[in-house]
């Protein structure tokens, strides 16, 4: 179960533009323009900011780096 959620998260991050379009299409009152600033680059920039060694404990840093590695592997 956890592996599936992990894989889904990686796919969401790597395909964020398509996922937002897919989820927002057909929804009443949905405005895709409100998500224009949300893209791969902005999500990764925010994610890298969260990996600050002064804020996270060692286990959380390791988990964050593992997720970053998986995202990079998926992109390549």
Image (cartoon, rainbow, N blue to C red):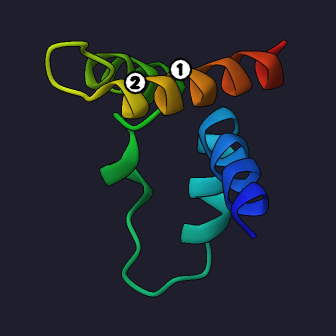
Comparing 43 with 60, the one in front is 60
Q: Find the residue positioned furthest to the front.
A: 58
Percent across and percent down for residue 1 are 75, 70
Dot 1 crowding, Cα within 10 Å, few <14, some 14–19, many 20+:
some
- Depth check, front residue: 7 or 56: 56
Nearer-the-camera pick, 6 or 57: 57
Q: In which quarter of the image is residue 73?
A: top right
Which element carries disc 1, helix, strand or loop? helix
Q: Is mark 2 on a helix, strand or loop?
A: helix
Pinpoint residue 67: horizontal percent, then vertical percent: 60, 31
Residue beneath the point at 37% across and 17% down: 48
Q: Position of residue 56 (x, y in %)?
A: 24, 28
Mark 1 = which residue?
A: 65
Q: Taking 62 as reference, is 17 above or below it?
A: below
Q: Is residue 35 above or below residue 72?
A: below
Q: In this view, does 35 lie to the left or right of 63?
A: left
Q: Residue at x 68, y 33 (%)?
A: 14
In the image, residue 47 sits, relative to residue 2, either above or below, namely above
Q: Which mark is residue 14?
A: none
Q: How far apart are marks 2 and 1 (CA)?
A: 6 Å
Q: What residue sits 76% from the left and 56% below the top? A: 3
Q: Are marks 2 and 1 in contact (CB under 8 Å)?
A: yes
Nearest to the observer: residue 55 or residue 32: 55
Residue 64 vs 53, above or below: the answer is below
Instruction: Determine the image quadrant of residue 75.
Output: top right
The count of marks equals: 2
In the rendered image, the quadrant that contains the C terminus is: top right
What's the mark number on residue 61?
2
* Residue 24 image offset from top left, x and y in percent: 54, 69
Q: Is residue 66 left or right of residue 57?
A: right
Q: Residue furthest bottom?
A: 28
| Within-10-Å neighbours for mark 2: few <14, some 14–19, many 20+ | some
């Amino acid at each position: 179960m956890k592996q599936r959620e992990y894989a889904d998260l990686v796919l969401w991050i790597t395909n964020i533009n398509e996922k937002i379009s897919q989820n927002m299409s057909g929804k009443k009152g949905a405005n895709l323009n409100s998500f224009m600033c949300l893209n791969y680059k902005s999500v990764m920039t925010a994610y890298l900011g969260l990996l600050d060694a002064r804020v996270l404990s060692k286990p959380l840093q390791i988990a964050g780096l593992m997720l970053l590695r998986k995202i990079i592997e998926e992109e390549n």
